[in-house]
């Protein structure tokens, strides 16, 4: 029987102070009581699977052992999931995603199968293609990944070099990687796990190039798992994080696949080699849009994980005295600590709220595309780019801030903060590099500005540009609504400045492309300001919307959090607001006080707020952040698992140290 430990007394007191119902907030964050129950039930089943408990912490395993252990556990997880889903409805994707952390400390080698392979078959395949591959993929009779990036090109996908040449005689495509730079590089699970992949390649028919298209390719024998003839595949080696994601490389040499393997929901190649264009060639990029939307949700979760660890630790940790002769204080009582941590909680809420509406917008576009309507696609692309970029970047900063807030112990692998950081920082690059995505949004913003100048009606997310052009800047008030308008003014001002900068360079004789490059620092700043305005506006709206359907005590806390988020960003960007809005120095001074008041208001609820994220110890996997707060005991228990502590004297003493010391004595 597992030993039940006493909960740390500080945490007990913190939980007694909480002014709202923690469970009510958990249900709200999960999207309903039923979702929470489903999640807890599944996590509980996993908790009791003995084979999922690691005897040796993953960190002490070799690269190879770590991978093999991850595959072993991922297979068990999949089987448990299949059994669970046989009895009930299919688990929600977010619940599956969360449960994965309880099983594998790092990233699953199946991450890309569920994250991109299956969604691409759904998003890019015809009904016939879906009927052929989806049942096998969903049952994991075939395991796949998404192989787009190459050694030479990741961002500029029109420049990909893998070729798919159509041979009308045999009705096949011939895949080739002409140069070393054409090798696929990065796809998760590709190294040694998957037997299929979606390969994105340049289509050639009768010597003519038709751009990039997705192909479903079997790369390994289903029985022996050996690479098929014409396939060169392997693992790319250790990285900063993603230790068990099994990222791989892949090259093709005259590798033939049947015509039906080109995913043809959009463009098609007919038997005789006729190319039929799709409604919009950018629909080929559809899976990336979906994943960018999901990354906003991932960012919310990673921020919640880091906040949970750091807030609980800050409640348990005592260090230094505020006043002489008084006991050492809980570090959470230092205002600077609250400044580091409470924004982490609020940020997670901001991203969850943003994901809620962004995902609805995504579903609406998918529905519209089904009816051949694509009016909202450019706006969704622009939103998903800047919100992916900003949420992953902010999450990276917040996770690092939480690590710093844990002092030296935050640097321990057993705190789990390094792994969480590895995860969040990877997301800043993958699925569209940060700057590149901000520039995609900037492209949309420049067009929107032009339309605003022409008096056209704009899409809702940029409608503030028209308001800004029409009205004088509104009189400043320190209310959340007016501050959000202030963020919109900053965004509008920066968009105008970037636009004018481009025009200035063009007037001076530059090509538009060069002018764009010369203005690109301003362009990314405009895009960032737009993201912040969208995040604050959406977070405020969602909070107002939900506040009417929750208890008054919870509504009050949610209101504190959204205000904290907005005031924090006002103070962080005060310089911009002074330039572009009517805020005055005195308003900023008042907001500084307001910020301190909000920290004080949130303080009694800090532990309750992170408890409400309801991240189980198995998922958190942190010595510093466990629910019972046994920080020091756990640190010592984990240290004792070090193989170096398994013997009183390590052999290196006899081999090297002893002779070395002896020599030094002479
Ligand atoms: C809860 C569940 C959680 C699951 C989590 C799953 C996680 C999965 C893990 C993922 C691991 C990582 C995977 C990967 O990284 S896969 C590889 C990702 N690669 C990229 O993202 C590449 C980035 N590059 C691009 O997207 C394009 O090259 C780029 C957009 C930068 C440029 O493309 P292109 O050169 O073709 O286009 P232009 O810049 O010339 O623009 C032309 C117009 O096209 C519009 N456009 C561009 N992209 C899109 C799009 N996706 N949708 C709609 N429209 C698009 C663009 O706005 C231009 O329009 P205008 O001409 O009107 O301005
Ligand atoms: C952990 C991880 C997992 C991944 N998983 C997958 C996967 O499963 N499948 C897959 O296909 N890919 C995957 N990738 C690849 C990933 O999508 C690319 O690395 C990413 O899109 C960035 O492309 P790049 O590496 O070519 O960067 P580059 O484009 O070479 O970026 C280098 C620098 O150049 C700048 N730059 C590039 N273009 C421009 C521009 N137009 N304007 C201004 N600046 C520019 C960038 O801002 C950046 O600072 C993964 C990557 C990582 C790190």
Image (spheres, rainbow, N blue to C red):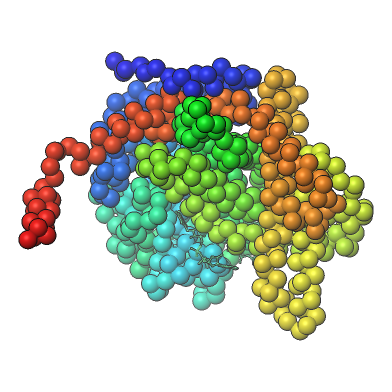
24 left or right, relative to 534: left
User: Quarter of the image containing the N terminus?
Assistant: top left
Q: Residue shown at 9%/58% (left/top)?
A: 665
Residue found at the far bottom of this picture? 509
- Is residue 119 visible to us here? no
- x%, y% of residue 274? 57, 66
Q: Is residue 645 visible?
A: yes
The percent coordinates of residue 376 (x first, y second) are: 73, 50
**Where in the figure is residue 325, as x and y percent of width and height?**
50, 27
Q: Position of residue 225 (x, y in %)?
A: 28, 50
Question: Horizontally, is 68 left or right of 662 in the view?
Answer: right
Observer-nearest residue: 563 or 421?
563
Q: Quadrant of residue 280?
A: bottom right
Location of residue 625 by image quarter: top left
Placement of 50 over or under 461, stated as above or below: above
**Residue at the far front in the pictured view:** 325
Q: Residue at x 57, y 51 (%)?
A: 393
Q: Nearer the viewer, residue 602 or 394?
A: 602
Is residue 522 shown above or below 384? Answer: below
């Amino acid at each position: 029987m597992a030993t039940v430990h006493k909960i740390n007394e500080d945490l007990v007191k913190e939980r007694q102070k909480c002014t709202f119902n923690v469970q009510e907030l958990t249900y709200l964050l999960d999207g309903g009581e039923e979702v929470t129950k489903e999640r807890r039930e599944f996590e509980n089943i996993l908790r009791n699977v003995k084979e999922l408990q690691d005897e040796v912490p993953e960190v002490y395993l070799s690269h190879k052992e770590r991978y093999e252990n991850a595959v072993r556990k991922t297979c068990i997880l999949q089987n448990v999931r299949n059994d669970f889903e046989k009895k009930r409805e299919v688990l929600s994707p977010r619940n599956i995603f969360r449960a994965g952390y309880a099983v594998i400390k790092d990233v699953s080698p199946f991450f890309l199968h569920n994250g991109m392979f299956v969604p691409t078959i759904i998003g890019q395949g015809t009904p016939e293609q879906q009927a052929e591959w989806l049942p096998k993929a969903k049952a994991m009779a075939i395991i796949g990944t998404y192989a787009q990036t190459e050694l030479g090109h990741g961002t500029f996908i029109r420049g990909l070099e893998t070729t798919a040449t159509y041979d009308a005689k045999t009705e096949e495509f011939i895949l080739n990687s002409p140069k070393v730079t054409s090798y696929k590089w990065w796809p998760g699970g590709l190294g040694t796990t998957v037997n299929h992949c979606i390969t994105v390649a340049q289509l050639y028919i009768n010597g003519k190039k038709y751009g990039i298209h997705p192909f479903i390719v079997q790369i390994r024998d289903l029985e022996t798992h050996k690479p098929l003839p014409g396939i060169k595949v392997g693992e790319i080696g250790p990285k900063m994080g993603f230790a068990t994601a099994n990222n791989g490389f892949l090259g093709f040499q005259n590798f033939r696949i049947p015509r039906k393997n080109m995913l043809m929901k959009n463009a098609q190649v007919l038997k005789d080699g006729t190319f039929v264009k799709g409604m919009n060639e950018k629909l080929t990029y559809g899976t990336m849009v979906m994943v960018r939307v999901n990354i906003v949700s991932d960012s919310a979760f990673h921020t919640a994980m880091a906040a949970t660890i750091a807030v609980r630790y800050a409640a348990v940790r005592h260090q230094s005295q505020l006043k002489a002769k008084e006991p050492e204080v809980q570090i959470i009582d230092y205002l600077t600590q609250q400044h580091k941590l409470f924004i982490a909680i609020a940020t997670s809420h901001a991203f969850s709220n943003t994901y809620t509406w962004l995902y609805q917008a995504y579903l609406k576009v998918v529905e519209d595309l089904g009816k051949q309507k694509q009016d909202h696609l450019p706006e969704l692309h622009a939103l998903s780019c800047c919100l992916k970029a900003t949420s992953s970047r902010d999450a990276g900063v917040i996770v690092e801030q939480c690590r710093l807030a844990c002092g030296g112990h935050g640097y321990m692998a057993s705190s789990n903060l390094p792994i969480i950081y590895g995860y969040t920082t990877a997301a800043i690059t993958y699925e569209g590099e940060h700057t590149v995505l901000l520039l995609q949004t900037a492209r949309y913003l420049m067009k929107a500005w032009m339309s605003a100048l022409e008096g056209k009606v704009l899409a809702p997310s940029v409608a503030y540009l028209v308001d800004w052009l029409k009205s004088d800047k509104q009189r400043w008030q320190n209310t959340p609504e007016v501050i959000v308008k202030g963020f919109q003014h900053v965004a509008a001002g920066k968009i105008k400045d970037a636009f004018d900068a481009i025009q200035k360079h063009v007037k001076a004789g530059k090509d538009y492309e060069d002018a764009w490059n010369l203005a690109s620092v301003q362009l990314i700043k405009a895009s960032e300001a737009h993201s912040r305005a969208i995040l604050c506006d959406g977070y405020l709206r969602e909070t107002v919307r939900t506040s009417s359907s929750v208890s008054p005590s919870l509504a009050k806390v949610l209101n504190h959090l959204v205000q904290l988020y907005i005031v924090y960003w006002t103070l962080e960007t005060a310089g911009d607001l002074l330039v572009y809005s009517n805020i005055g120095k005195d308003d900023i001074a008042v907001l500084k006080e307001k910020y301190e008041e909000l920290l004080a208001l949130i303080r009694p609820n800090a532990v309750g707020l992170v408890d409400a994220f309801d991240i189980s110890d198995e998922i958190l996997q942190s010595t510093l952040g466990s629910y019972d707060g046994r920080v020091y005991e756990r640190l010592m228990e984990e240290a004792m698992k070090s193989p170096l502590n398994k013997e009183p004297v390590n052999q290196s003493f006899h081999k090297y140290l002893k002779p070395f010391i002896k020599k030094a004595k002479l």
